Every structure is written in structure tokens, then in C-alpha cells.
Image: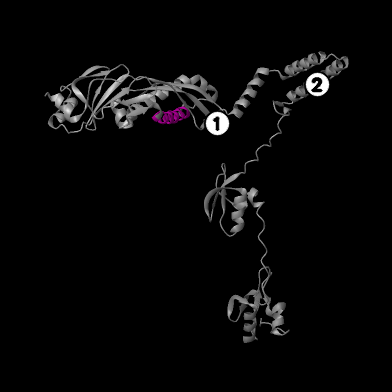
């Protein structure tokens, strides 16, 4: 009995002479050829057609990738040889090799779109939200990377399993590309092709490295604004097309007259003509008056008068260079006055451009005239007044009580006092508040 008959008898295996895959689907990316409980004979033929690649996985490891053509699976192929060696040593040894067919043709007309609006800043309209949609095409360029990074052991891998990831990556990259381009919203339509080319150049290295996929085509179908913004733009465009609003109003009035004239009733025609003329004159006058006054046309509210005048900005307060107890700084007049009032005893110096030297605050009329006078000091408490004293004990400043005590200690001596504002010294008995404390009678006059 031959070797292969023995193998058939003991393993009960089905032997394949030709391995091929005829793909009649439009969404299959990877197909694992059914070799479970099957065996591949030596010199079997592996047929790989155009738009396909075949991957041989031996013992769980990707061993070899076959391109289009007919390949003979014999012992000259290292992975195949290892397989035949395994069954030659022990017939019960299970076959752990697999053949995967990969479709390398283009998968076209895959739709993409923004699930949520993309925020961007426009120089003319400010922050705006845009939406975009289109189509893209791709193909598997590196079968080994695609098998390792994406497919794994999936025996039937379709486009539905990866299209979602590709769409999200494309939309994210498109939003980044549009944001960096800083192109005005009204000019986006003229740059669809540039956006597509830029995105393809940026994303292809990422797709090839992460998925083994190449983006073969990317098309932007439309970039749109929110509905309310598009309506506002339509109104703006309409106003630009209308041009002379007065002539447009007269034209509409003439159309109204023509419509009223078609009324079969003579009275209705007359009324229609009167209404038409009245409306035309009224609208013409309103438009003329508004346009002469600088008014603007609002499509929702009609002609609007000129905007209210805006008051001029308040005058800028003058500033000075200040040096004082709190340090040096540049202050306004009010700020300098606040510091002078807070510390009247301090040295407050002022300087301004053009002055030859610093000045005291009191020498600057703009400041001195606005500094309020210092509050008056309260009168001294009874008995708390002080006098300049000259007597037997010498000269010094004494209170009224101290002077009374000095007179009582030396009643025969001369005691003189003086206060600010007096023209000369006075005897103690000549000062009423002191004389009253001495009992109404003062001491005898000091000897001459």
C-alpha cells in the first residue's frame, strides 16, 4: 500500500489537488479556505487570481504570502515542507495550517459623513458649524499587515467590520485639515479637491501602518452650513441681486396694478389701481427717506432708520509721576489727592513731563485746589490746656494745674505765662482760667 493510501486509511482525510477561491460577493475582504479535517497533497495547485492574494498560516504563524498566479505546493516551499514533514512523522499529528484568500481589488463608493457638526472660526461670520459628506475607496495593499492587525483568525471578514473605523478616522482627519487650512466658509467649495488630496497624503501612511490599507480615492460631496445660516446667506444674496431697492419697489407696485387690472369687475380694477398707486408711493417715500438718512433694509422688518449716535469715549485722566511714603508710581490726580489726605504729614512729591524738577503737592495748583482742608482740632479738655511758664523754677511748658501748684509753692515770686497767639507774656493773675483757680485773687506782682 502506498504512503498516500495509508494516510487516507488512517486519517480519513480529504485530499485537495486545486485550491482556489471564486469570489462572487462585493463585500468580502478575507476568506479562509476550508481545510479543517482536510489534507493538502504534495504538488497541489494554489490558484490566486488577479485582485487576490493568498496567505499560508502554518502552526498559527503567517508563513508566506502568494500573489496572483498558479503556485505548486510542494516541499520546495518551506512552510509546505514543514507541514508534510509533520504528517510524515506521525499520522495522528493534526494539521494546523490554513490558507486565507485576500481580496486586493478596490472597494469603492463607500459613504462617509459627519455625525456631528464641525466647529470652525470664520473671519467673516465668526464661529460657525459645518457638515460634510462624500465617498471613499480603498484596497488592501499589505496582506500580511492586514491579517496581523485586523483579521486575526476571522474566517470571513467583510467590509462592514472595518468601514466604521475607517469613516471615523477620515472624518476626524478632515476636521483637522479644514481647521488648519483657515479657508473662509464661502470659499470651501473651491477647495474640495485640495482638501481631498491633502487628506489622502496625510492619512495613507497611517492606514498602511495600522491596517495595511491604502486609500485609493476620497471625494467631498458637499460641505454645508446650518439651515438658518444658509437662509441668512440666501437673503443677503437676494439683496445684492436686487440692487436699487426703490426701483424694485416700483416694479412690484406695477406688478400689483397689472394683477388688479385683470379683475373682471370695474370697481375692483379701480380699487386695485388705487391700492397699487398708494402702496407704490408710500413705499417709494419710505425708501427714499430712509436711504437719504442712511437707513438699511431689513428683510424681516423693512427699512430701518439710521442707528442712534454713539457717545464719544470719556476724556483720559491726566497722570503724574508720584513719590511719597508709599513709594513711586504713576497716578491720576484723584489717586494723589487720596494719598495726601490719608497722610497729610507725609512728603508727597509730584513730577510731570516738561517740568525741570519735582514739586511738592501743594505747589501744583491742579492738585492743591482739590485737596480738602484738614479737619479742625478739638479744643483741649478743661484743665488740659498748656502754657509756656517762666517762674522761680525756670522756663518750661506746664499745664494749668502745674502752674497753680508752682504759684502756691512760691506765692511771693513772679510767675509769667504765654500761649501761641499772645503778643507778650502775662502774669498768672491776668489769665482768667488761672486766676479763677487761685480763688479770685492772684499773687502779688513780681518785684521789679
Q: Which mark is residue 376?
A: none
x, y percent for residue 191 = 48, 20
Q: How many marks?
A: 2
x, y percent for residue 353 = 56, 42
**Secondary structure found at label 1:** strand
Which part of the image, by quadrant, shows the C terminus?
Answer: bottom right
Camera-side residue: 340 or 110? 110
x, y percent for residue 2 = 12, 23
* 212 sits to left or right of 7: right
Q: Which residue is mark 1?
A: 128
Residue shown at the point (80%, 22%) measured from the top left: 282
In the rendered image, the vertical position of residue 232 relative to residue 403, given as above or below? above
In the rendered image, the vertical position of residue 191 relative to residue 323, given as above or below? above
Is residue 60 shown to the viewer in this render? yes
Please, which residue is most extreme toward the left here?
A: 1
Chief secondary structure of the magenta span?
A: helix
How are the colours assigned in the image?
one colour
Disc 1 packing (10 Å; few <14; some 14–19; many ≥20)? some
x, y percent for residue 70 = 24, 16
User: In the picture, residue 396 is in which quadrant?
Assistant: bottom right
In the rendered image, the vertical position of residue 306 relative to residue 376, given as above or below? above
**Secondary structure found at label 2:** helix
The residues tagged by marks 1 and 2 sit, at their Cα atoms, a distance apart of: 39 Å
Q: Which residue is mark 2?
A: 279
Whether residue 170 is in magenta: the answer is: yes
Residue shown at the point (15%, 31%) measured from the top left: 91
Please give the range of residues in magenta.
161-179
* 101 sits to left or right of 199: left
Disc 2 packing (10 Å; few <14; some 14–19; many ≥20)? some
- CB under 8 Å between callouts 1 and 2? no
Amino acid at each position: 500500500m502506498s504512503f498516500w493510501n495509508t494516510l487516507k486509511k488512517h486519517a480519513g482525510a480529504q485530499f485537495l489537488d486545486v485550491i482556489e477561491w471564486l469570489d462572487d460577493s462585493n463585500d468580502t475582504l478575507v476568506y479562509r479556505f476550508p481545510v479543517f479535517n482536510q489534507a493538502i497533497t504534495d504538488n497541489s495547485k494554489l490558484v490566486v487570481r488577479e485582485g487576490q492574494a493568498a496567505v499560508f498560516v502554518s502552526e498559527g504563524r503567517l508563513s508566506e504570502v502568494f500573489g496572483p498566479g498558479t503556485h505548486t505546493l510542494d516541499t520546495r516551499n518551506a512552510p509546505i515542507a514543514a507541514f508534510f514533514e509533520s504528517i510524515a512523522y506521525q499520522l495522528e499529528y493534526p494539521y494546523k495550517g490554513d490558507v486565507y484568500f485576500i481580496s486586493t481589488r478596490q472597494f469603492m463608493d463607500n459613504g462617509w459623513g459627519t455625525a456631528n457638526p464641525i466647529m470652525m472660526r470664520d473671519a467673516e461670520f465668526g464661529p460657525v458649524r459645518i457638515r460634510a459628506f462624500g465617498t471613499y475607496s480603498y484596497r488592501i495593499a499589505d496582506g500580511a499587515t492586514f491579517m496581523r492587525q485586523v483579521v486575526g483568525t476571522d474566517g470571513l471578514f467583510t467590509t462592514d467590520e472595518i468601514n466604521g473605523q475607517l469613516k471615523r478616522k477620515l472624518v476626524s482627519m478632515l476636521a483637522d485639515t479644514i481647521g488648519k487650512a483657515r479657508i473662509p466658509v464661502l470659499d470651501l467649495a473651491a477647495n474640495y479637491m485640495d482638501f481631498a488630496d491633502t487628506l489622502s497624503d496625510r492619512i495613507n501612511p497611517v492606514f498602511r501602518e495600522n491596517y495595511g490599507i491604502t486609500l485609493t480615492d476620497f471625494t467631498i460631496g458637499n460641505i454645508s452650513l446650518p439651515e438658518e445660516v444658509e437662509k441668512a446667506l440666501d437673503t443677503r444674496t437676494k439683496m445684492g441681486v436686487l440692487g436699487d431697492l426703490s426701483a424694485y419697489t416700483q416694479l412690484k407696485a406695477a406688478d400689483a396694478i397689472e394683477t388688479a387690472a385683470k379683475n373682471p369687475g370695474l370697481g375692483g380694477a379701480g380699487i386695485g389701481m388705487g391700492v397699487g398707486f398708494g402702496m407704490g408711493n408710500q413705499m417709494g417715500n419710505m425708501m427714499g427717506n430712509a436711504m437719504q438718512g442712511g437707513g438699511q433694509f431689513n428683510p424681516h422688518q423693512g427699512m430701518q432708520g439710521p442707528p442712534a449716535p454713539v457717545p464719544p469715549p470719556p476724556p483720559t485722566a491726566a497722570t503724574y509721576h508720584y513719590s511719597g511714603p508709599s513709594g513711586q508710581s504713576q497716578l491720576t490726580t484723584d489717586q494723589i489727592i487720596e494719598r495726601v489726605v490719608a497722610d497729610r504729614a507725609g512728603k508727597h512729591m509730584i513730577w510731570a513731563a516738561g517740568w525741570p524738577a519735582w514739586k511738592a503737592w501743594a505747589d501744583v495748583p491742579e492738585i492743591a485746589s482739590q485737596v480738602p482742608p484738614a479737619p479742625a482740632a478739638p479744643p483741649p479738655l478743661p484743665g488740659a490746656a498748656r502754657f509756656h511758664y517762666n517762674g522761680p523754677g525756670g522756663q518750661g511748658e506746664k499745664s494749668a494745674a502745674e502752674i497753680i501748684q508752682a504759684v502756691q509753692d512760691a506765692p511771693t515770686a513772679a510767675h509769667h505765662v504765654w500761649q501761641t497767639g499772645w503778643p507778650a507774656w502775662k502774669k498768672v493773675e491776668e489769665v482768667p482760667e488761672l486766676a479763677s483757680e487761685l480763688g479770685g485773687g492772684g499773687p502779688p506782682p513780681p518785684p521789679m
